[in-house]
Image (cartoon, rainbow, N blue to C red):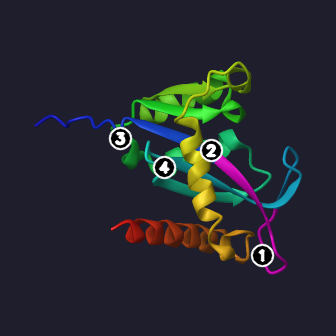
């Protein structure tokens, strides 16, 4: 029996957020673009802003490398995905080719120049809303965890709470 392609799973949005560390955190890197010393949260969300995959790295890992790791670690979750939307930090043929090879999906880049000329893609802001949902949890304002895996679990717990409050 052939699988039906759902409109919700055929499209994902990728983005990363740099977060400052507190003193107890062991893993740290420096994101020169944002001028933040800490960690980077990589998130793949569906069209509703709900996470399909989360990956946490040190801040010195580039957005492209973090997204490649996120997609490689969660490859089975992206079987139905046809298109991946990302911001300008993910530009480049190498990234598009690696996404095509890993999950067989087309990469769409929402460029900053399109936003200045009034061509706003509403789907692009879905991922920013997801990051703002995480900002409602005081423990996630900064990275307070010693290990990267613990930070990932705290993000997962926050999204679980968001989902449970909806029902």
Locate the C terminus by quadrant. bottom left
**Residue 116 occupies quadrant:** top right
Calculate the distance from the C-alpha at mark 4 to the C-alpha at mark 2.
Answer: 11 Å
In the rendered image, which residue does mark 1 sit on?
25
Please tell me which of labels 3 and 4 falls first in the chain: 3
In the rendered image, which residue does mark 3 sit on?
8
Question: Is the residue under label 2 in contact with that under label 4 (CB below 8 Å)?
Answer: no
Calculate the distance from the C-alpha at mark 1 to the C-alpha at mark 2.
Answer: 23 Å
- Residue at 72% x, 77% y: name it: 146
Q: Is residue 36 above or below residue 128?
A: below
Most distant residue in the top direction: 117
Judging from the image, what secondary structure is the residue with disc 2 in?
Answer: strand
80 drawn magenta:
no
**Residue 150 occupies quadrant:** bottom right
Observer-side mark, 1 or 3, equals: 3
Calculate the distance from the C-alpha at mark 4 to the C-alpha at mark 1.
Answer: 28 Å
Please tell me which of labels 4 and 1 falls first in the chain: 1
Calculate the distance from the C-alpha at mark 3 to the C-alpha at mark 4.
Answer: 10 Å
Please tell me which of labels 1 and 3 falls first in the chain: 3
Most distant residue in the front direction: 118
20 drawn magenta:
yes
In the rendered image, which residue does mark 2 sit on?
15
In the rendered image, which residue does mark 4 sit on?
49
Location of residue 25 in the rendering, given as x and y in whole percent from the top left corner: 78, 75
Front residue of this view, candidates 157 and 72: 157
Location of residue 33 in the rendering, given as x and y in whole percent from the top left corner: 85, 43
Q: Residues within 10 Å of mark 1 (few under 14, many from 20)?
A: some
- Residue at 43% x, 47% y: name it: 48
């Amino acid at each position: 029996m052939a699988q039906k392609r759902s409109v919700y799973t055929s499209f994902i949005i990728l983005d990363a957020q740099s977060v400052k560390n507190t003193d107890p955190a062991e893993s740290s890197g420096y994101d020169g673009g944002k001028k933040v010393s800490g960690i980077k949260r990589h998130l793949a969300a569906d069209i509703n802003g709900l996470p399909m995959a989360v990956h946490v790295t040190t801040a010195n890992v580039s957005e492209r490398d973090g997204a490649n790791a996120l997609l490689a670690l969660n490859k089975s979750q992206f079987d139905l995905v046809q298109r991946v939307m990302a911001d300008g930090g993910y530009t480049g043929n190498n990234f598009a080719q690696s996404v095509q090879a890993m999950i067989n999906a087309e990469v769409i880049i929402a460029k900053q120049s399109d936003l200045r000329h009034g061509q706003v893609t509403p789907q692009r802001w879905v991922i920013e809303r997801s990051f703002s949902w995480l900002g409602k949890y005081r423990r996630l304002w900064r990275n307070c965890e010693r290990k990267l895996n613990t930070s990932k679990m705290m993000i997962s717990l926050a999204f679980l709470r968001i989902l449970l409050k909806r029902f």
